[in-house]
Amino acid sequence: MFQSGKSTPYHWLSLLALISVSPATFAHDLEIHGSNTIGATLAPMLVTGYLEQKTAGAVQLQQTDAANEHLLTTTDRDNPVQILVAAHGSSTGFRALASGQAQIWASSRPARTTEIEQLRPTADLTTLESEHVIAIDGLAILVHPDNPVNAMSLETLGRVFSGQINNWAQLGGPNRPITLYARDDRSGTWDTFKSLVLGKTYTLDNSAARYESNDQLSDDVASDPGGIGFSGLASVRNSKLLAISDGNAPALKPDQLTVASEDYPLSRRLFMYTLGQRAPVQARELIDFTLSSSGQALVAQSGFVSQAPVAVKPQFDSSVPESFRKLTSQYQRLTVNFRFTEGRTKLDNKARRDLLRVRDYLSQEQRRPDDLLLIGFADTQAHELRAQMISELRALSVRKALGAVGVAQVAYTGYGHYMPVGGRGSQRNGRVEVWIKSR
């Protein structure tokens, strides 16, 4: 019995939180909460593939009474299995993971510092055991199919969505008002757009229509001659894609190479977060399946970009120096870039897994380590010699890391601060590209 005056408000709130979370915690075998970008199509496909592989049985997919929620069911040794995918935005997924309601947080943005600190007593979301990059997405900038505008800079895009540019005639298009379409505040897609496009300089204009669904936003842009919006790459549908430039770098459209390598200015990683070793076995199994070749094949099938390396012959534009054309003339480029943590001295979690993907690619394609060439790049430096040194050291660090996983003595070089893929100061400029000899 609770006695009047004996319980503080904190105790009551804790009790209410426990009561509200407990039923959901035990309602399903596994719950995935978060990003609509991931949860609308990709997560159900991954769960279906995982369950089919695990149980060899048929998997039923049904929508629950709540919008943007799906329940996947099957049987395993005559025992029913239920996995819920709730796609209400990346921030909702963090709250569900923190409360114990979800075992997997699907996020279309990296975990924030405040979120990492909040969960640190339970798990470190920055570790390889907790942070899982499941796919690469390109934030697609969408317009009506008949819109004659083909490219836009990040700065211009910010001015458009802040309302400073409000007619297509200002951009070389028809004399027609610009209509804005944006994802809602709970969306990781919105968080990415706000960070990469609006930043601290611009604020989204109040006239923008807001959406929980990528697909619905894209469909509405495609039917509005004055419309412009943004969505995940898998939701382009009938809209037209714009090429986007950052600083002095050339404008790029999102495609398999530009997105997988994260050269496209609005590339982003899609994540699943778990509580490391505290995650239940089924959650860890689903993550392992997602990162496997079978899971990454489903990523590609869903419309996102798989992390499995593919050899591509890039189409160079006029900005590419003749020396670089000669350097790579006998090579194709793999759709993977090695990038570094914020301090730029250590390979990040995705890069650590990419080491194994490159190793596996060589084995599957029956290629040798000496078929590879690593080319390092640096951000703009005051002195060319310093940039050259940094770019070579980056390539050397990847060479050593590949050696540690059994890919020894790979050729490497640096290309200094030339051929940037972003504006000055962009972390994307500091990268190591992977090239392989053409057959």
Image (spheres, helix red, strand yellow):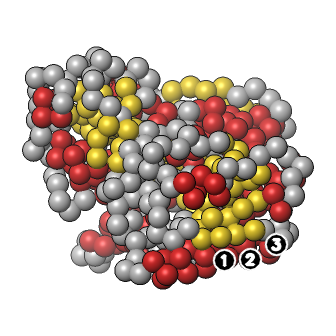
**Toward which corner of the image does residue 75 lie, by quadrant?**
top right
Quadrant that contains the N terminus = bottom left
Mark 2 touches mark 1? (CB < 8 Å): yes
In the rendered image, residue 310, in percent from the top left (x then y), is placed at 70, 44
Cα separation, mark 3 vs mark 1, equals 12 Å
Mark 3 touches mark 2? (CB < 8 Å): no
* Element class at badge 3: loop
The residue under label 3 is: 409
Q: What residue lies at 18% left-to-right and 41% top-to-bottom?
A: 160
Q: Earlier in the sequence, mark 3 or mark 2?
A: 2
Residue type at mark 2?
Lys
Cα separation, mark 3 vs mark 2, equals 8 Å
Residue type at mark 3?
Gln
Q: Of discs 3 and 1, which sits in the foreground? A: 3
Residue type at mark 1?
Ser
The residue under label 1 is: 397
In the rendered image, residue 390, in percent from the top left (x then y), is placed at 53, 79
Q: What residue lies at 59% left-to-right and 32% top-to-bottom?
A: 302
Quadrant that contains the C terminus = top right
Q: What residue lies at 44% left-to-right and 56% top-to-bottom?
A: 421
Mark 3 touches mark 1? (CB < 8 Å): no
* Element class at badge 2: helix
In the rendered image, residue 10, in percent from the top left (x then y), is placed at 31, 73
Q: What residue lies at 17% left-to-right and 59% top-to-bottom?
A: 201
Q: Earlier in the sequence, mark 3 or mark 1?
A: 1
Q: Is residue 39 visible?
A: no
The residue under label 2 is: 400
**Residue 436 position (above or below residue 39):** below
Q: Residues within 10 Å of mark 2 (few under 14, many from 20)?
A: some
